[in-house]
Amino acid sequence: MSVCTTIQQQVYCLAIKICAAATQTGDSTTLEAYLETQLQDLLSDSDFNNGDDWTIAWGPAVWQAPFSTFSDQAVAVCYNSTQNTYVVPISATNPNAPYNVFFEDLAAVPHYMVPVPGGNAGNVTVGNYAGLQALLSLSAGGNTLQDFLSSVAGASDDLVFCGHSLGGGLTPLLAYTLYPKGTTGSGWGNVYTFPTAGPTTADAGFASAFDAAFPIVTGSGYQMWNANQYNAHDLVPNAWAPGDGSTPGLAQITSTVISWLGGMYYTGVEMSAEIATLRTIAETFAGGSANPFVACNNNNLFTGPREYGQITDNATLEKEILYQHTTAYNVEFGVTALFDDATVQATIQPPLLPLVRGVSGVASAVAAATEAAEAQTAEAEPEPSVA
């Protein structure tokens, strides 16, 4: 029996495979050739295609920042002629690319947000806006992505945009920019999105516009369209919205010192302070109490079991974050046989991981400052009087 038995599984696999060039260096032509081979290997795998006829219809195309030798952005169009479905997978954060890690991912300060193209659709982080413009600028075979999609659109075919992590954040932005009315007037039978683990990248104006143009098409579990599929124990989809307990957001980044309580992480007391510091840093990035981010349609698909039990050090925290952002999804989608864990974790890493790697020293400083302040306050308090 094939590993993939649903179109959503296949779409998810393409969102993971489009990241394959993250371990490579070279010019865009070299990286595109490598990525084409990787995609073709997946399309030809019977465990992936389930007997469907898949081809690469456009691309893959790789965008590089000035002086970069990495795949800073990658996109392709794959076609399933058996199910009349075109799929546009968008790459995740390349953990080796400084442009991805330090600009696209972390340029989220609300003060620098810019309008979503098209007008009257809210504002988006400047980092994700730059990623969107990079995708729109790419060409393959003499055609931009927009030109190619316009040339093949047909009422008998569906179009799906997908991506994981950073790609999951860019998915609704790219789909809305190209098709601001969703399926209506698009020339396609249906235009869908299938983001996974995507962070919230825009404000209420965009969330309202996107949700109206791309309403959720319901189904069982992950077999739905137009909702960000996410793991409640994954750090990434909980950035950058504040969250209220029922939607993804920074408020969900919590810890507990007791294993059966509901924190995102099971930690000791010291690491609990570190988790709180991590959340505070992220909340500061997102504008603090003035946080403008609002999540688009989302589906809390699952809550990944804790892989490493109690977290007592920063290295284990990193491993847990990485597992929940990558392998846990492969398990949930039932596609572990198609992907090697180490390979996937080398090509996709959470955009907030740099904060985690630096938070240990910050947490220690905060704890020391708090302790000193408490001691100073205690010294300043007057002795109680004796009657």
Image (spheres, rainbow, N blue to C red):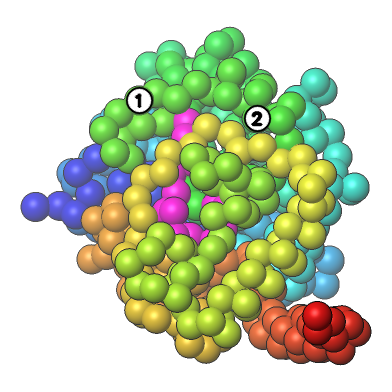
Mark 2, Cα crowd under 10 Å, few <14 / some 14-19 / many 20+, is: many
| Residue 384 visible in the current orientation | no
Where is residue 276 shown, x and y percent of the image? 64, 69
Task: Name the residue located 57 percent from the left edge and 66 percent from the top edge.
Answer: 350
**Residue 227 visible in the current orientation:** yes
Q: Which residue is mark 2?
A: 207
Task: Give the residues in magenta.
Answer: 226-238
Residue at the spot x=76%, y=86% of the render?
Answer: 371
Residue 123 as seen in the image, left or right of residue 209: right
Q: Position of residue 357 (x, y in %)?
A: 65, 82
Which is nearer the eye, 341 or 109? Answer: 109
Q: Amino acid at mark 1?
A: Thr
Image quadrant where residue 309 sits: bottom left
User: Where's residue 149, x and y in %?
Assistant: 57, 29
Q: Residue 372 colored magenta?
A: no
Give the left or right position of residue 95, taking residue 307 as reference.
Answer: right
- Does 352 appear above or below 40? below
299 up-or-down from 230: above or below: above
Mark 1 secondary-structure assignment: loop
User: Which residue ends up furthest to the left in the rendered image?
Assistant: 1
Pick whichever of labels 1 and 2 is earlier in the sequence: 2
Which circle marks residue 96 in the picture? none
Above or below — where is 213 with respect to 185?
below
Asked which quadrant contains residue 133, the reply is top right
Q: Which residue is label 1 attached to? A: 218
Answer with the quarter of the image where residue 222 lies: top left
Q: CA distance from mark 1 to mark 2?
A: 18 Å
